[in-house]
Image (cartoon, coloured by chain):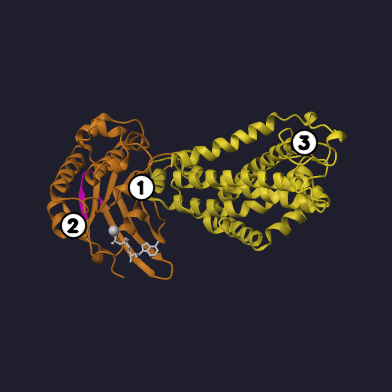
Amino acid sequence: MLTISNLTYHIANKGYLFQNVTLSVQPGEIVGLTGHSGIGKSTFAKVVAGYLTPDEGTINRVQNKRQPHPVQLIWQHPEQAVNPKWRIKKVLEEAGPIDDEWLERLQIHSSWLKRFPDQLSGGELQRICIARCLMTRPDFIIADEITTMLDPITQADIWDVLRQIAKTESIGILAISHHYELLERLTDRTLSFETLSKK
Amino acid sequence: MRKQLWIPLVLFLFIYSLSIMIQEESITIALTEKNESPSWSHLFGTDWLGRDMFLRTLEGIQLSVTIGFVTALLSTTLGFFLSFIASIHSVLDHIVSWLIDLFLSLPHLITLILISFVLGGGFRGVVIGLMLTHWPVITRVLRAEWLQIQEMPYVQMSKQLGKGFWWRTKHHFLPHLLPQMMVGFTLIFPHAILHEAAITFLGFGLSAEEPAIGVILSESMQYLSSGMWWLAFFPGVTLLVMVVLFQWFANTWKHYIERDRSYETYFNN
Ligand SMILES: Nc1ncnc2c1ncn2[C@@H]1O[C@H](COP(=O)(O)OP(=O)(O)O)[C@@H](O)[C@H]1O
Ligand SMILES: [Mg+2]
């Protein structure tokens, strides 16, 4: 289980972004986290995934040296999450040897591997990022607005696969979106970030 | 675009290889042929000892290019290491930034003369002097590049994917910095050549026995009044041609590898 307790984070000169956020995610469970834009959801995601250090509070999953973080973050903008000068093959290999199973399940065509990131559509590139994330065998995934930039059909496709994977691989997913209805449809339960981070 | 790149480079390399083929022994004293103005047998004329000025000029060019190359290489290397140190911790960054500002606020030529003078002049003095006055520009640009690359989401991601610092350096940082280092190198190169000639001319650089363009120019001073214009004209023009050729190449190259133009404020003055 991923347990986040009393997480507090502040931004210099701006005060607290959130305080005492407590939340847990079971393996295989999909939890939604919603809230209006600018409230601090992405920052929260980065703290939980180990990109930022919290002021206070604990997270029971931490990264071991030279090991992938057990909580992997998928970013909203896939084009920022891959080195633009690398071919897709190298992008994927950053997470280890390429696992064809994931390519297949995410419908990644093998001809994409020799392309550069700007030669794929946003949805295709996001699937690459998801595959890379899954290749690290994470216990939990934080999906931060991962389909916000995509059209509804691509959005539905991606979430179908992710939900399946969550169940078959017992990966817990924290799905972040400002879009409450989307989360209601996708998740087992949805929390409001505003309620969680009552100051 | 391609032509703009290789024409100056080929011309530059042609003149440089010509200068390498010159043996110092082939520049002989021939008092019967002294003080001759330019002719077909002596393209650039001869000096007061009858030495062929074309050969002397090429010999000087070879030395200039060598100094430019060594200096540009050392400055770039120093810039790389200092910018790397600055990227490690904000305290180190403050120190490096302070040093950059300090050196940039000093007048280039005077600092150069002082350093070269303190080190006793000569090849070593000139090269170290040039290096110590040219590193701040490249360090400043590389430091900004380090800061930028380390902020990139895909680099932070790399860490979360389990990649260590050295792996990230090799695969993310260096490929990002290398083009900027090459641009810096090509911009320092002509600068160094001109500065070397300047301080040697003033007598603070290479010693008078060296076949340097600056030495040729300062020696020719006393003969100019007697009408021997070719002694200064051809060496000076050849040096300028080399610098212009290289700068032409460097400018095209800079655009060619599509890096940002953050060096411009320092060099296009
Ligand atoms: N490094 C930072 N410096 C200053 N402000 C920041 C920084 N990171 C985030 N913020 C601010 O924190 C707030 C929350 O941002 P974010 O976590 O991206 O919110 P959300 O994902 O909910 O839209 C925003 O107002 C943003 O401008
Ligand atoms: Mg966000």
Q: Is residue B86 left or right of residue B31?
A: left
Tell me the amino acid under the disc marked 3.
Answer: Asp
The residue that mark 3 highlights is B52
Element marked by disc 1:
loop
Q: Residue B47 or B140: which is nearer the viewer?
A: B47
Residue B141, image x, y percentages: 53, 53
Residue A31, x across and y down, in percent: 21, 52
Disc 2 vs disc 1: Cβ atoms closer than 8 Å?
A: no
Residues flagged by tags 1 and 3 on a common chain: no
Callout 3: SS: loop
Q: Do we see residue A176 in this rendering?
A: yes
User: Whole-percent x and y of residue B45?
Assistant: 75, 39
Check if mark 2 and mark 1 are on a common chain.
yes
Q: Nearer the viewer, mark 1 or mark 3?
A: 3
Quarter of the render that holds ligand 2: bottom left
| Front-most of residues A103 and A72 | A103
Q: What residue do we see at 20% from left, 43% from top?
A: A162
**What residue span does the magenta drawing correspond to?**
A25-32
Do the numbered discs 3 and 2 sit on residues whose CB atoms are within 8 Å? no
Q: Is mark 1 within 8 Å of ligand 1?
A: no
Looking at the rendered structure, which numbered label has been put on residue A61? 1
Under mark 1, the amino acid is Arg
Chain ID, orange in image: A
Q: Quadrant of the N terminus of chain B?
A: top left
| Palette colour of chain B | yellow
Q: Residues within 10 Å of mark 1 (few under 14, many from 20)?
A: some
Q: Residue at x 36, y 33 (%)?
A: A96
